[in-house]
Image (spheres, rainbow, N blue to C red):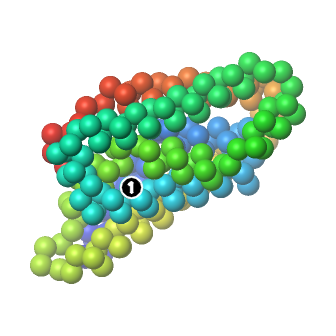
Amino acid sequence: MSLETLIRFLVATAIIAAIPGPNIILITTDSIRYGLKKSIATVIGVSAGMIPLFSLSLAGISTLLIRYPWLFDMLKLAGVSYLFYLGITQIFDSLKTGRSHLKAIHLKDSFFTKGFLISATNPKGFFFAGAFFPQFLTKNAPLMPQVFILCGGCLLVASLVGLFYAVFAGTANDLFKSEKFQKRTSLFSGLVLVFFGMALFFTDLPDMV
């Protein structure tokens, strides 16, 4: 793999990672409501959740999902259910009174676990790795070193993008500390997560990987 190819891959990955999705929404919401330090755990969880996705995809699970659509449906249902759970939780939190009560409830949760689950249960990750990575592989060159480089580069870029959003949202946390603003943030993020869950529910199995 040439340096030029690697740079093109990293730039393309950064552009894709920067597009707001469930992961970014979760990271920014945690940073605004609970501070930068705790949202970093969310970023780490999101990145860690990509590891099993990439590993299984490169091991051929994406082809297996194509052959057995019910497996795709089960994975999709798990992802939809968790997105709905997070979204509805955010919406109900926005309706509760007392910021201290909200924080007391949230401290029972694991920021890392939330990030990991929302990332690992997204079936699109399988097809992203299965369809995107091969475009940057060099023929007649050792495969595994290239795969490790691409996976490592993707995780690094995704983590940096997530950290950027967390820092940006953490700055907003200093500017908008009012309970009213944070409740509106929870309501908005909850609705967006539910929307992403609905969009994922109506996602069809790709024709090819």
- Inspect the image, locate mark 1, and give the three-letter code of the amino acid beneath it: Leu
Corner quadrant of residue 171? top right
Can residue 1 be seen here?
Answer: yes
Mark 1 neighbour class, 10 Å CA radius: few under 14, some 14 to 19, many 20 or more: many
Q: Nearer the viewer, residue 38 or 69?
A: 69
Locate residue 63 relative to residue 166 in the image: left or right. Answer: left
Residue positioned 27% across, 76% down in the render? 144
Residue positioned 31% across, 35% down in the render? 73
How many marks overall? 1
Locate residue 52 relative to residue 180 in the image: left or right. Answer: left
Q: Quadrant of the N terminus?
A: bottom left
Locate residue 110 relative to residue 44 in the image: left or right. Answer: right
> x%, y% of residue 190?
59, 27
> x%, y% of residue 98?
86, 25
Label 1's element? helix
Q: Residue furthest left?
A: 140
Residue positioned 21% across, 43% down in the render? 68
Corner quadrant of residue 140? bottom left
Task: Check the image and report above or below for 144 versus 53.
Answer: below
Q: Which residue is mark 1?
A: 53
Residue positioned 60% across, 45% down in the render? 114
> x%, y% of residue 41?
65, 55
> x%, y% of residue 153?
41, 67
Corner quadrant of residue 150? bottom left
